[in-house]
Amino acid sequence: MSYRLILMGVIALGALRGVTVARAPEPGRARTNLVFVASPEKKTFTSGEDVVFAFRLENHGDKDVLVSRTFLLDRHVLMRIVGPDGGEVPWCGRIDGSELSSKDFAVLRPGASISAKKRVSCGPNKAFGYKLEKPGAYVATATYHLTEPIDVLEQMAGNALVAKPRLVAPKVRFWIK
């Protein structure tokens, strides 16, 4: 009888070894159900023309989420653009290091979206952007993330969640003639 009890104990412990316990997310850091989309305003641009992208965040979850309403390039939106020669297109100009305020953020309600159009190319009289000078096909991947300290974001969020993880939009193609 004791052999049977020991055997059952060993089997039970072996079964429990594979069990993992999920931790509850920390307040304000629960997983969000945001979708990030980045797409060129059109598929073909002429050489020297501003290349403009539309950026959109959609809240497919059931909780309010704090997001950036500005979609600042090289701060909240990072882009990796591969040019016609297969190399990564470089950034040109300055990086916007200005201080942000609470008006630069928004609480995105469930089912809601927020979007903005941004010029992503640089050129004469342009402060910043990507060097999109060569004719041909380009492939762009955009990543959205908040760079501000979590405690600052949580203070602005109130009862809303904070969208802290990186969200990667599907790759898109565009051409320059």
Image: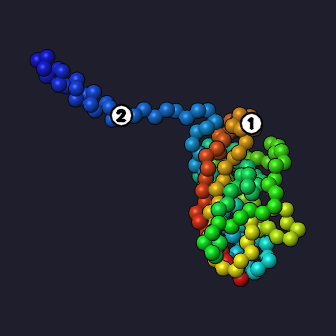
Residue in the image at 73% along x and 42% along y: 148
Q: In the image shown, does 125 or 22 lie closer to the viewer? A: 125
Q: Quadrant of residue 85?
A: bottom right
- Judge the density around disc 1: few (<14), some (14-19), many (≥20) Cα neighbours within 10 Å: few
Residue 107 drawn above or below residue 58: above
Element type where label 2 sits in the image = loop
User: Where does residue 172 sit, x and y in percent of width and height?
Assistant: 61, 69
Q: Where's residue 92, x and y in %?
A: 78, 63
Residue 35: name its quadrant. Answer: bottom right
Q: Residue furthest top?
A: 2
Query: What amino acid is found at the position of numbered circle 1 in the picture?
Result: Val
Above or below residue 97? Residue 45 is below
61 up-or-down from 176: above or below: above
Residue designated by label 2: 19
Find the residue positioned furthest to the left. Answer: 1
- On the rendered structure, is 30 left or right of 158? left
Residue name at image x 57 percent, y 42 percent: 31
Q: Residues within 10 Å of mark 2 (few under 14, many from 20)?
A: few
Q: Among all residues in the image, which is located at the extreme bottom? A: 177
Res. 6 image quadrant: top left
Q: Residue shown at 65%/66% (left/top)?
A: 88
In the rendered image, the quadrant that contains the N terminus is top left
Judge left or right: residue 37 versus residue 9: right
Viewer-nearest residue: 79 or 165: 79
Q: Which residue is mark 1?
A: 152
Dot 2 and dot 1 residues touching (CB under 8 Å): no
Image spot of residue 113 (x, y percent): 68, 55
What kind of residue is marked 2?
Val
Quadrant of image for the C terminus: bottom right
**Side (left or right) of 170 relative to 7:** right
Using the numbered discs, state the Cα–Cα distance from disc 2 to disc 1 in whole angstroms. 36 Å
